[in-house]
Image: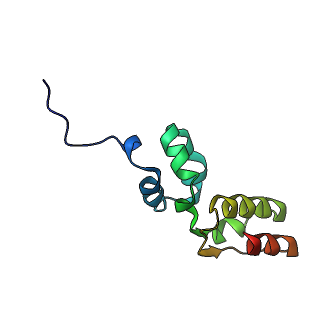
Amino acid sequence: MEAAPDYRSWDELIPDALGLIFTNLSLQERVSVIPRVCKSWAKAVSGPHCWQEIDIVKWSNRCQPDQLDRMVEMLVTRSSGSLRKLCVSGLQSDAIFTFIAQK
């Protein structure tokens, strides 16, 4: 009988733990790379732990207002009410401020 390895696979970590690890990655990596690695990583990055603090100031300075509103809506929704900090520049409509406040 073989001995069990002393390590666990990344995809076996609970989603909350993975989510906390993923907060150290860039926004681009969390949105476009991590979800494509495997199903458990996609589940973890879609959970609220990755989105408690959102800093998109640099990105928001170079995007169109309609893109910015869609991105803010997507990220605030992903936070599932756990958002503690949002850093963004260039929000222009009252509707997006209302959306953020309600979420």
Q: State how many labels appear.
A: 0
Q: State which quarter of the image contains the N terminus.
A: top left
Q: How is the image coloured?
A: rainbow
Where residue 65 appears, x then y in whole percent? Answer: 82, 65
Where residue 32 appears, x then y in whole percent? Answer: 60, 47
Q: Is residue 39 above or below residue 67?
A: above
Please say whether residue 48 is visible from this viewpoint: yes
Using residue 14 as the reference point, say whether residue 55 is left or right of it.
right
The residue drawn where x is 50% and y is 37% is 38
Using residue 64 as the reference point, say whether residue 2 is left or right of it.
left
Q: Is residue 69 above or below residue 7?
A: below
Residue 52 location, quadrant: bottom right
Q: Is residue 13 above or below residue 90?
A: above
Asked whether 68 or 103 is in front, the reply is 103
The residue drawn where x is 67% and y is 65% is 59
Q: Is residue 83 above or below residue 78?
A: below
The residue drawn where x is 84% and y is 74% is 92
Please say whether residue 93 is visible from this viewpoint: no
Asked whether 35 or 26 is in front, the reply is 35
Q: State which quarter of the image contains the C terminus.
A: bottom right
Where residue 41 appears, x then y in whole percent? Answer: 49, 45
Residue closest to the far top: 1
Where residue 98 appears, x then y in whole percent? Answer: 82, 74
